[in-house]
Amino acid sequence: MSNEPEPSVTLPWLVRLRWLSVLGQAIAVGVADHVLKLGLESGLLAALVLLAAASNLALAGLARRLRPTWSASAVMGGVLTFDTLLLTALLAASGGPMNPFTVFYLVNITLSALVLSTRWTLLVAALSFAGFGALFLLPTDMHALHRGPAGMVPHLHGMWVAFGLAALLTTFFVGKVTRAIAEQREQIAALREAGARNARLAAITTLAAGAAHELGSPLGTIAIAAHDAKLSLERLPEAQPAAEDLALITLEVERCQEILSLMAGRAEQTAEDGAPLGLGELMRSVRAQLGDERSARVEFRVPPAGENLDVPPGQTIQSVVALVRNGLDASPDGSPILVEVQAAGGQAHICVADRGAGIPPALLARVGEPFFTTKQPGRGLGLGVFLVRAFVESRGGELVIQSEPGQGTRARMRIPLSAALRGAVS
């Protein structure tokens, strides 16, 4: 991948800078002709300013029709090369090397160094050097700009103004483009991280699907044998400890089967779409999977009855269940869990909040990594949040976990709705 910024990042700011430059040129020509009465070739200067404005109109139209295959260096290099030649023509018609605005050569060179390759920067620098040198070859009255009662004062004032404008434009443009490039790189890093997570998810789900197929029969046999043995030992008072151990084995086998089934099911639901998810169905399904005792602690805040969310039903329900279970496990007995659901701006917003002990900042950054869990050993596999994040990001959304020690934890899912429903909820 090329390290140069995309035209979509640099061209909009260059268009704005060039409009400022056109405005400044027009004002400078007007002041020189009507206020200072310098006797410059105002017609030629006006034509060059109009040429700059027309070229920027063309550049603005080009910026709105960008193509991914276009090279940033070719577009930006061509524009800055043209601007260097145009600046040379403007200077030649307005005092030559004595014009204080020759400092603007350095603006073009600075912009080239910021957004172009070394080859393009050297080209712009060479053109600037050659253009400035060519101004000395023109038949120019070296004292024309100094005549009048004030002598050198207008020229010195012009140098001061030109320096200030060059510094201002350079600082403004460099700062804006630097921030835009930084944002672009952050987005690229986020996309790479999401791609790595999706690759890990694909590997885990593929492994789980195979493991579920290969281990399903042995685990089923173990569960049946342990259950039958437990029933037999329960009739013998002296064998109660062994019966309890067999009951524990049965529970652990069921937990293994549930984990494998969940992981394998994620592989099969990757492309799930279908009917929209009704809010009533969401609440019923979540409560059914949690059981009566635990679901009694869950409070739902949802839009009016009858509204649907155009999101994958199965994976959305499983994601909410996973987050609610985490909240229940982290909260004191009897503490409620709040589930808020909203549809706005073409997106479904689902928030699960608990009043538990919270997550320390050092661990919060790792929440969502596969096989990382803050639960006690044996109470979690560390895949719940990872699977939720993978699902949400696969739909173009995001999962944000907010937590402070002693203040509880809030897990916010943002899932884009399909285009069919966006107009209704916007």
Image (cartoon, rainbow, N blue to C red):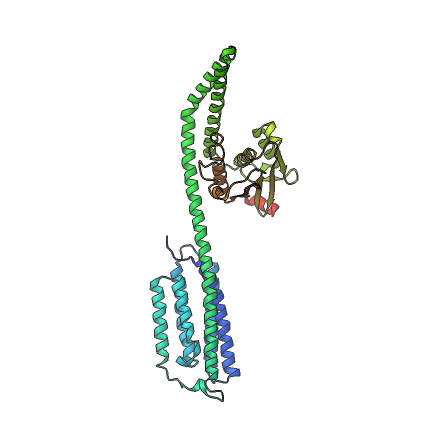
Q: Nearer the viewer, residue 5 or 246?
A: 246
Viewed as shown, does residue 187 lie left or right of 356? Answer: left
| Residue at the right extreme, as displayed | 304
Residue at 61% over, 32% down: 334
| Residue at the bottom extreme, as displayed | 149
Please tell me whether residue 417 is drawn above or below residue 184 in the rendered image: above
Viewed as shown, does residue 131 lie left or right of 339? Answer: left
Please tell me whether residue 115 is drawn above or below residue 192 in the rendered image: below
Q: Where is residue 217 shown, x and y percent of the image?
A: 43, 22
| Residue at the top extreme, as displayed | 236
Residue at 44% over, 57% down: 181
Please tell me whether residue 337 is drawn above or below residue 12 in the rendered image: above
Q: Nearer the viewer, residue 70 or 250?
A: 250
Q: Where is residue 153 shown, x and y percent of the image?
A: 47, 84
Question: Can residue 326 be seen by looking at this rendering?
Answer: yes
The number of numbered badges drawn on the structure is 0
Question: Can residue 62 be seen by looking at this rendering?
Answer: no
Residue at 43% over, 45% down: 193
Please tell me whether residue 423 is drawn above or below residue 93 in the rendered image: above
Q: Where is residue 367 shown, x and y percent of the image?
A: 48, 40
Q: Where is residue 69 shown, x and y percent of the image?
A: 40, 55
